[in-house]
Amino acid sequence: MTFLTQVLNGLQLGSIYALVALGYTMVYGIILLLNFAHGDIIMVGAYISWVAMASLGLHPAIAVVLSIGGCALLGVLIDKVAYAPLRNAPRLSILITAIGVSYFLENGAQLVFGADAKVVPAFVDAPNIVVGDAHVSVIAVITIVVTAVSTAVLTFLVQRTKLGRAMRAVSEDMGAARLMGINVNTTISFTFAVGSALAGIGAILYSMAYAQATPTMGIMLGTKAFVAAVLGGIGSIPGAVIGGLLVGFAEVLVSAIGLSVWKDAVVFALLIIVLIVRPTGILGRTMNEKV
Amino acid sequence: MPNKHERSVLVQMETPNLIPERDLGQIPVLEAKHLGIDFGGLTAVDDFNIAMGKTEISGLIGPNGAGKTTIFNLLTNVYKPTRGTILVDGYDTAGMSMVQVNKMGIARTFQNIRLFDKMSVVDNILVGFGNQMGTSLATDLLRLPAHWRREREFRDRAMDLLGIFDMQRFANTEAGNLPYGAQRRLEILRALATEPKVLLLDEPAAGMNPNETEELMENIQKIRDEFQIAILLIEHDMGLVMGICEVVGVLDYGRIIAKGTPDQIQNDPQVIEAYLGKQEVI
């Protein structure tokens, strides 16, 4: 294993975490909800790919579209059915609902697909490229490029479009946004759709790397991405990317020095340290308590 | 247009409303009839009536806690009235959402400034323009030239609005970092961007120095003249209220205790006692 390979591995894993963390951060940014079902949306995305390719024999490109579209739809549906009725309820109620949705999706998947892992067929036929003495994984390169493009599109969307401005306005002051003519419900649905679509992209990239779908695959992935989002400063888009890459690199580094059993512990230790030193995360803003 | 030196000729409407003569013969742009709201057992506002001409500037004054901001919250459907009706351009707004009321033509500012602090000044105004931009996500992402053209067009319009208060240089500043007075002015511009027929200003001069207030008075009149809209304002600065308002209503304990021209209000003994205290302040 050369240095370049490790860097690529770190970037690949970090990219997947970053994509998932972006979804966490967007939903938190707009309705202050830690959407614990977010990781399970990825699981559903992986199963959609498996059904599309392994059961129905569809072209991988169609599987990609179905996974991303399916995840976006699922995200909006979860919001409409489970979260929207609790918009004015105490925040704890909606948080517990999110945990409930998470269990529902995991156990639902187990009921439908069984507990054993399904092998997701390869999306692309990608042999490794040898550069000097390093093996460069094409899938790693695809993952990194797709993440970079997704982040760029998301940034454009949030910063330079009407819907993005509406999202930022709603996240700052829902009441004032309404009085300025912003349809808050549409804006929230849109946020869920985009966040979940990113989870769909994450699902495909994850399936490319690990080629299997299990009902509980979203738990650890979601938790790590949550750590990434908090690490970077929850609510911040660049923060989610930085946090995701940091977590990815930390894991790869720990594994590379032969301590792979410790990799999860290191990620969570990293979270604890950051929260002690900088409670709002790396790019999080310090909150000014209004008196 | 009338200014603070020549008073408007007022016409008695269906009691107890007054509107400027020039707006007579048109449907009042904003009308409230016997409006009231109770919070629990407490009556916060009772039997509030107003009819605003299309280009009228009116003021609502009264001691703290009299219910002035509550009236703004009723007029913008933040609160659902316990009694009474609100008509915007003759249409009953009962059951409408805050968004619909805004689309009907009511826009407001807030007593405690509520800008989108982390967004740039120009983005705050663009949020206000939102409903006119009428773009779809598909156009935004797939037809980039059209998207940029529209963004530029509305950015230019936002800059024009900023020009009213000579604030173009702040366009890319984060709204939260603006000086206090500029934040108040930006809130007015953001509300104007939604193309209102009635602009509700909640203490627009709060925290401004006398020079800024003087300038604000001129600008409020300029806005009315240029956009041909009605402006209803809540204000504690008597100079401003008496200077630019054509009709002044005095609220005390949720009820209008007097209504009339600034001159009538200043000489109304009931007002002097209830609001200004025993001593003659003005």
Image (cartoon, helix red, strand yellow):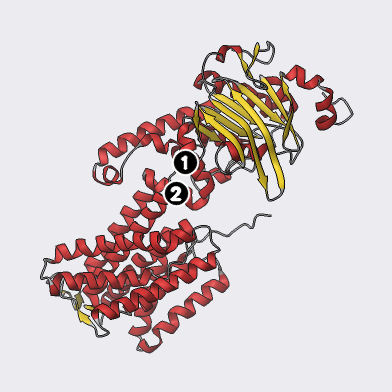
- Which quadrant holds residue A276? bottom right
| Direction from residue A209 to residue A253 in the image, left or right | right
Up-down relation of residue B151 to residue A1 (above or below): above
What's the residue at 71%, 32% (across, down)? Answer: B209
Tag 2, which chain? A
- Assign the C terminus of chain B to one quadrant of the image: top right
Q: Secondary structure at mark 1?
A: helix
Q: Residues within 10 Å of mark 2 (few under 14, many from 20)?
A: many
Q: Secondary structure at mark 2?
A: helix
Q: Which residue is mark 2?
A: A184
Residue A158 in the image: above or below residue B202: below
Q: Residue at x 48, y 77 (%)?
A: A270
Residue B36 tag number: none
Q: Amino acid at mark 2?
A: Val
Q: Is residue A230 visible?
A: yes
**Image coordinates for residue B172, horizontal then vertical, percent:** 48, 40
Query: Is residue A249 among the parts visible in the rendering?
Result: no
Asked whether disc 1 touches disc 2, contact meaning CB atoms under 8 Å apart, the reply is yes
Q: Position of residue B158 (x, y in %)?
A: 45, 32
Q: In this image, B266 relative to A113: left or right?
A: right
Q: Which of the image's four quarters has the N terminus of chain B?
A: top right
- Residue A41 falls left or right of residue B83: left
Give the percent coordinates (x, y) of residue B112. 64, 43
User: In the displayed image of the protein, which residue is found farthest to the right?
Assistant: B278
Q: Which mark is residue B99?
A: 1
- Looking at the rendered structure, the kind of residue marked 1 is Val
User: Crowding at label 1, few (<14), some or many (≥20) Cα neighbours within 10 Å?
Assistant: many
Q: Is residue A180 above or below residue A50?
A: above
